[in-house]
Amino acid sequence: MTTLWQRAGHAALVLPLLLFLGLFFVWPLVTVLDQAVSDPVVSRHLPATSAASAAWDRSSAPPAEMRQALVRDLRAIDDDQIMGDLVRRLNSAQPGFRTLMKKTVTAARDSSGDLDLGEVDARWRDTAFWRAIAEATNPYTDRNLLAAIDLQRDRAGAIAAIPEGESANRAILLRTFLVASTVTLATGLIGLPYAMLVASATGWRRQLLLAAVLLPLWTSLLVRTTAWYILLQDQGLINSALSALGLIGKPLPLLFNRTGVIASGALLVFMAALGYYITPALIGGPKDQMISSVIAFYATGSANWGMAGALGIVLLAATLVLYGIYGRLSATNTRG
Amino acid sequence: MLRVSRFIFGAATVLFLLAPLIAILPLAFTSGSMLTYPITSVSLRWFEELATADAWHRSIVNSLIVGAGTTVLATVLGTLAALALRRRVMFHATLRTLFLLPMVVPAVVLGIGLQILLARLGLANTYVAVIVAHTVLAVPFVLVSVSASLDGIDPQVERAAASLGAAPARVYLLVTLPLTMPGILSGAALAFATSLDEVVLTLFVAGPNQLTLARQMFSSIRENISPVIVAAAFIFIVGTVAIGGLLAAVRQRSMRTSAIP
């Protein structure tokens, strides 16, 4: 009979791992989510303008109060880095802010008291610029999430597709799922009959067949990828064997294309393939890069954390859906 | 006819699985600097470079430091949790799912989150950061391995110990723990192997002083591929086979001992 005291003892054993994963697994994922949807630049650095914009209906001329709040906010910013972030954020919503802000900041700093912004630059008479500021005051945004699947909000705020040729995220996502499905299919086509073969074999044959599966499984993914790289290169084993046999005149381009990625990824199942980074990064060409590589590019290459986070969430969501399906399937199996 | 096609299928699959590994291994012993056959003469120069070149040498040491740290941390955390989850504690199924999730979450997503978080905690570019990141990935392996071996323990044995007057802690230490040892050992080996092989999280959280062997291989494959990489791969494969053999031996021994009663 277990007492309450003993039960508490067992629960306590779970705490170290729970805390550890909470801190270093759940929190990082929440951070990614937060990076993807948060957009704090304008609300943090133009506080008075943000407060004043709440009262504006966003179609009539902006109230004088909001105009003067902007002048005060701009005067209060003395850090060039912050000003740069602010201008970049506003310019991405409404082109033209870069020059407009430069002019306005100079005018605001050279004067004191109220300033007629329409006199400083005629663009301040255009509500589009004010609307861009008002919309950017929301500290949360769906811009990155929409952009991750090639969508954006148009002037009226409705969701619309990004013009053809401006972004390739959807193509990359499709490609990721395509490669992952092909890998799953190939794995099934090879794995199922192979498992039947292993089950029916006996003696040393069975040992050999099992070892052949286990060795690559135990071997580092990186080593396997290196091996494929060396085999598939232009002067690699496959090409030299084929040309020695007189079958081909010039080397077949096996590397940096999809055949290579699929051949080398065929041991992985869908979930692993989905977040797969190493093999496409090394064996694939630019047209075979899968979603993980793009996320890594946004994060390390261009430090666009919002975009990296948004793409990451799309990938994470897909993985969790698959994990849920997997859980259902394996649960029915054990029950039935 | 069926026998022949079965044989061809089996042979082709074995070839597909093993050929790349077997084909590259001899290239580690080439004396030339190209990764192509035929090998003109045999030498150990690439192994020498692996041991002496500063970047490679340091990366091997780093891999051992990080691997050891990860193994200890993941084994302790995973074993404790497995012991707890054996009893039906509250939220049993939910906790188990949460603990296994690091296996399926895309590493790139976790990597970005960890990079931001560890930088905020002031741990960026430290060994602790790399060990923590690897432990997140390694814990599920320990948990699964230890749980499997706990499931195999006959509860009667523990009840017998308790009925003879042993306190719960004594039952744990003298009965449960020794019986679980094979699971703990193979969990530890898997944790070490996971850490050794990890590249993606390392890319995000390691600074220039914590580059592991796998990370170093990754960047040198991207820059210029030389036989040093194959020499490193050779060591990897030999190490893997050794760990695999160790695991198999531990399992066989535990099967034999559990078969005695």
Image: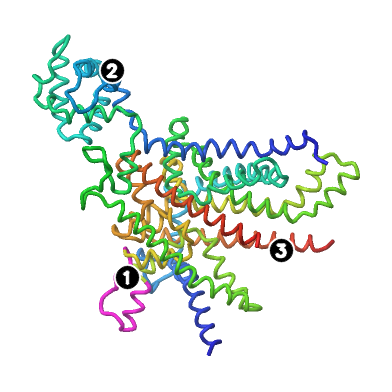
Instruction: Give the SS element for disc 3.
Output: helix
Gap between marks 3 and 2 measured at Cα = 72 Å
Gap between marks 1 and 2 measured at Cα = 66 Å
- Same chain for labels 1 and 2? Say yes or no: yes
Q: Which residues are magenta?
A: A237-256
Amino acid type of the residue that numbered disc 3 sits on in the rendered structure: Gln
Q: Earlier in the sequence, mark 1 or mark 2?
A: 2
- Residue located 46% across and 48% down the image: B107
Q: Where is residue B66 shown, x and y percent of the image? A: 53, 44
Inspect this view and state whether residue A303 appears.
Answer: no
Q: Is A247 a magenta residue? A: yes
- Residue located 77% across and 34% down the image: A4
Q: Residue furthest top?
A: A113
Question: Considering depth in this image, is B133 or A243 the residue closer to the camera?
Answer: B133
Amino acid type of the residue that numbered disc 2 sits on in the rendered structure: Ala
Q: Which residue is mark 2?
A: A48
Front disc: 1 or 2: 2
Q: Residues within 10 Å of mark 2 (few under 14, many from 20)?
A: many
Inspect this view and state whether residue A198 appears.
Answer: yes
B185 up-or-down from B76: above or below: below
- Residue located 26% across and 41% down the image: A158
A183 up-or-down from B182: above or below: below
Q: Residues within 10 Å of mark 1 (few under 14, many from 20)?
A: some
Q: Which residue is mark 1?
A: A235
Instruction: Give the SS element for disc 2.
Output: helix
Report the predominant secondary structure element of the magenta stretch: loop
Q: Which residue is mark 3?
A: B252
Circle 3 chain: B
